[in-house]
Image (cartoon, rainbow, N blue to C red):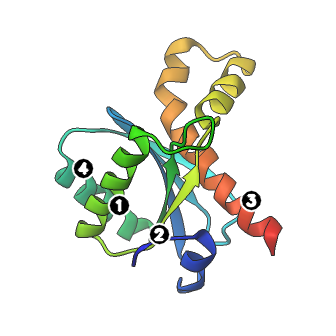
């Protein structure tokens, strides 16, 4: 399955399959899980990156246990909407993942995701240490929820 649009990815899903959201960074990958109705995204965990293949094979095992059939990966556009080096890195990540597992992958604009999550955590009076521990998984949740919201409001 190629990199595609959310509408195309969801149309090939068997019933009750889930999406997983990823916020891919240099040191960590935030992970979120969506419900089977494609309405609610929830934070799952953070992967501290070590070796790509072993990290992703472990994630694939987890995906099988949870029933995940597709990925929504944050697309790190520049603020002006142009693609920069971070988009190249994310595209490389997606292509490398597809060599390990054939499944739909959707890119979702992630501009403002970390800032929105950070603002919410500050408003909730979380300590800096607690914010750091949760930021990436919450950013992945924001990314996946944005894809769900676009899908559910356009139909």
Quick one: label 1 or label 3, which is nearer the N terminus?
A: 1
Helix, strand or loop for disc 2: strand
Q: Which residue is mark 2?
A: 70
Instruction: For marks 1 and 3, give the CA distance.
Output: 25 Å
Q: Which residue is mark 1?
A: 62
Q: Residue visible at 56% across and 39% down?
A: 139
Is 11 rendered above or below residue 54? below
Q: Residue visible at 39% across and 39% down?
A: 85
Q: Position of residue 117 (x, y in %)?
A: 64, 31
Q: Residue visible at 60% across and 54% down?
A: 144
Say whether marks 3 and 2 touch (CB < 8 Å).
no
Q: Which residue is mark 4?
A: 55
Helix, strand or loop for disc 4: helix
Q: Is residue 62 left or right of residue 40?
A: left
Instruction: For marks 2 and 1, give the CA distance.
Output: 13 Å
Say whether marks 4 and 3 touch (CB < 8 Å).
no
Quick one: label 3 or label 2, which is nearer the N terminus?
A: 2
Q: Quadrant of the N terminus?
A: bottom left
Say whether marks 1 and 3 touch (CB < 8 Å).
no
Is 155 rendered above or below residue 146? below
Q: Which disc number belongs to residue 149? A: 3
The front one of 66 and 60 is 60
Label 4 CA crowd tier, 10 Å (few <14, some 14–19, many 20+):
some
Q: Position of residue 77 (x, y in %)?
A: 54, 43
Is 146 rendered above or below residue 137? below
Task: Locate residue 140: give its quadrant.
Answer: top right
Instruction: For marks 4 and 3, give the CA distance.
Output: 29 Å
Quick one: label 2 or label 1, which is nearer the N terminus?
A: 1
């Amino acid at each position: 399955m190629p990199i595609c649009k959310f509408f195309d990815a969801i149309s090939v899903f068997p019933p009750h399959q889930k999406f997983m959201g990823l916020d891919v960074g240099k040191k960590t990958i935030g992970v979120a899980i969506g419900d089977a109705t494609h309405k609610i995204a929830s934070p799952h965990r953070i992967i501290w990156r070590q070796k790509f293949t072993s990290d992703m094979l472990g994630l694939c095992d987890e995906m099988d246990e949870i029933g995940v059939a597709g990925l929504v990966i944050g697309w790190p556009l520049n603020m002006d909407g142009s693609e920069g080096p971070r988009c190249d890195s994310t595209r490389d990540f997606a292509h490398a993942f597809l060599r390990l597992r054939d499944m739909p992958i959707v890119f979702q604009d992630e501009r403002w995701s970390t800032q929105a999550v950070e603002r919410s955590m500050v408003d909730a009076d979380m300590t800096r240490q607690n914010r750091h521990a949760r930021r990436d998984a919450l950013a992945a949740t924001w990314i996946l929820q944005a894809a769900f919201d676009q899908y559910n409001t356009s139909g």
